[in-house]
Amino acid sequence: MSAPRLEIHLEHLQHNASTLVNRLSSQGIKVTGVSKATLGLPEIARAWVTAGVHSIGESRIESIESLSRYELGVPLLLIRSPMLSQVDRVVAHAAISCNSEAVVLKALAAAAKCQGVRHGVLLMVELGDLREGILAADLEEMVLLTLTLPSLVLVGVGTNLGCQNGIAPDEANMGELSHLMTALERRFCIRLELCSGGNSANLPWLAGGGNPGRINHLRLGEALLLGREPLTRTAIPGLYTNAITLVAEVIESKRKPSRAWGTPHCTSFANGPVVPQKQSDQPMTMRALLALGEQDADPAGLSAPGISIEGASSDHLVVSEAAGAEAVALAVGDEQRFELSYSSLLRAMTSPFVSRCFIGRTA
Ligand SMILES: *Cc1c(COP(=O)(O)O)cnc(C)c1O
């Protein structure tokens, strides 16, 4: 088998999804499976649909378009505000998009009218993480605009925390979203379908007894793919953290001094030099070189028992035995498997040098 490769256990991904779908449905919450870190792999989307997700979410129109060819039987949700230049493609392939700009809503409405379709709109509210969203004070005006455009359907309100500034969902911001939803329904005499509370960063708050209030929808990526919540990277009980792993091949294996020597300067990927010590001071350690680099994965997001990541350049990953660990004997030609962080997974999926290998089939 070729290396580097991502090994994708579809049954484990399906298990993660059905576990969270069931756990959250007991709180009245539906799940959109966000597949963007996999560039919208249809095999994964299908496993999630089998597990009972409400819809599939993607941030790029290209992935929405390719998923739309697989007839998954669930709506496709564009989770990033549509580019003004892509509104035709958005209304043609996404059932719903997340929105925060009046000019985009008007363009979506015109495109939908032209195509004879109605397009769903989820209005995103800024609640403190300072990425996308309408300020609460401007929300009524945007709702009014959406309601006056007959080719648009206002499906609800949502927010996104955690991703930009690591702001955690809590009683205050989640309570505010619930309150805004109720206030809008009263003000406009409407009933909104979705109150979309956020992403995987919402799970610790809910697991800790947070009151969902009106929140009845989450958009989950990292929790489904990697079994972790993003705020502290803690594993979520009952989920697989190794449903997707990265396998790389050893190309050099030698005992070498544990520190570099000579005059240090910037490295290929870092500005700070490593402080050198004289060669004679160095204990020798077992080091291995893997055919994997910055071009394939974020090295800071790789982990494997007994192995410490020393660093990486474009095409080389340097590892050593972790302190106190049992010696992991890596010989040339051996394969080493790593668990991945979200950023590492995203880069590995994006690299043309990393192949994908599916293990197991889902129902
Ligand atoms: C990426 C993204 C998600 C999913 O985030 P996870 O932390 O992977 O669960 C949800 N909503 C929006 C708007 C996103 O951009």
Image (cartoon, grey):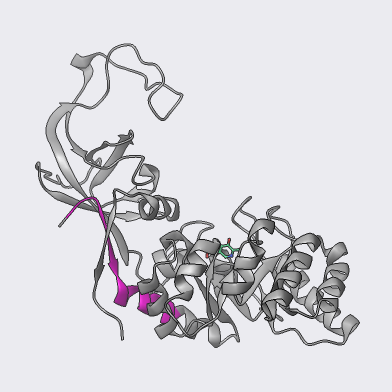
In which quadrant of the rendered view does residue 101 lie? bottom right
Q: What is the x, y in percent for residue 322?
A: 25, 42
Q: Look at 80% across and 80% down and name the residue there.
A: 150
Q: Is residue 292 left or right of residue 90?
A: left
Q: What is the x, y in percent for residue 164?
A: 62, 51
Residue at the far front in the pictured view: 114
**For the magenta stretch, what is the residue range?**
2-19
**Quadrant including the C terminus:** bottom left
**Quadrant including the N terminus:** bottom left
Q: Look at 40% across and 64% down and name the residue there.
A: 226
154 over 245 or under it: above or below: below
Displayed-image quarter of ligand 1: bottom right
Q: What is the x, y in percent for residue 76?
A: 55, 75
73 over 233 or under it: above or below: below
Q: What is the x, y in percent for residue 35?
A: 46, 67
In which quadrant of the rendered view does residue 264 lie? top left
Total number of numbered labels? 0
